[in-house]
Amino acid sequence: MLVVGLTGGIATGKSTVSTLLKARNIPIIDADLLARQVVEPGTPALAKIKQTFGDEVILPNGALDRKKLGSVIFNDEAKRKQLNNIVHPAVRKAMLFEVVRSWANGEKYCILDVPLLIEGPLWRLVGLVVVVYCSEELQLQRLVSRDSCSREDALSRIHSQLPIADKVAYADVVLDNSGNKAELEKQVDALVQRLDKEVGWTWIVGYMFPPFGFVSAILVLLWRFLKTLVKPPSRRAKTD
């Protein structure tokens, strides 16, 4: 089974692409959704957050008080790292579980929808990296329109992330979302066709004979790692 990493920048249209892929019956593993699930009442991660940050970040119903926690870690790098050290391992474990479940269901490929795929850097652990791209100016316009915020606030949020042009440097496939939805859908259809072609019949062998699938996955990851050692990602604008 091929594991595909999907990422982008704020207001580039990653969520739209994820929705389009899901509509084509492709399994989507949403890191943001899992990040909310792993801190639900009764989870080990929430218990660690309570132990680390105190009862004040827990609501009376036992749920996480996200607003209060946000105020605690705001402008405090040490506490933000503490939170990340609790949440990120739990999310990675949940993603791995979902990948294994997709394989057990006989899926040819699955999509990891991860905003921080490159920063993680989880991109090293997927077989294919897809980046949803648009220019920074278009990002800015869309963000202002979507969130009804000022250009200054929108620009600050954009600059808090790794520039989208830098993410493109890591991409195997770039989906250019500078046009309308119909144009984006054509690119998504082309991506699905490419995935079907790349997977071919090997997914059947990997599903029927798990050791073969495991070895194939290890070889793909090793090849990706060796490529980055020989030639680290460089800024490029590759479009499929």
Image: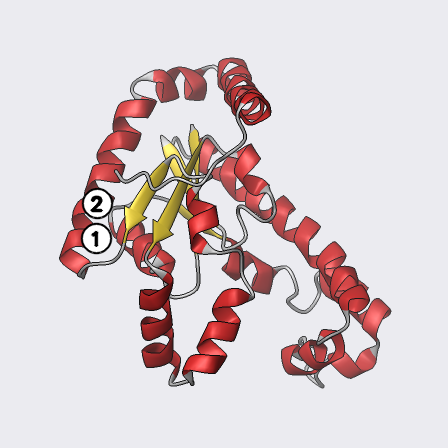
Above or below, 29 relative to 207: below
Real-space CA distance between mark 1 and mark 2, rounded to the nearest whole angstrom: 5 Å
Residue 17 as seen in the image, left or right of residue 112: left
Amino acid under label 2?
A: Gln
Above or below, 188 relative to 48: above
Seen at 29% across and 47% down, the residue is 175
Residue 39 as seen in the image, left or right of residue 149: right
Quarter holding the C terminus is top left
Residue that carries the numbered disc 2 in the rendered image: 187
Tell me whether circle 1 and circle 2 mark residues in contact (CB < 8 Å): yes
User: Depth check: 68 or 237 in front?
Assistant: 237
Q: How is the image coloured?
A: secondary structure
Residue 5 as seen in the image, left or right of residue 75: left
Seen at 49% across and 51% down, the residue is 114
Above or below, 94 relative to 60: above
Where residue 47 sits, quadrant-wise, is bottom right
Quarter holding the N terminus is top left
Amino acid under label 1?
A: Leu
**Tag 1, which secondary structure?**
helix
Seen at 20% across and 42% down, the residue is 189
User: Depth check: 226 or 53 in front?
Assistant: 226
Seen at 41% across and 39% down, the residue is 171
User: Depth check: 125 or 10 in front?
Assistant: 10
Q: Position of residue 197 (x, y in %)?
A: 26, 24
Residue that carries the numbered disc 1 in the rendered image: 184
**Tag 2, which secondary structure?**
helix
Neighbourhood count class around disc 2 (C-alpha, 10 Å): few under 14, some 14–19, many 20 upward: some
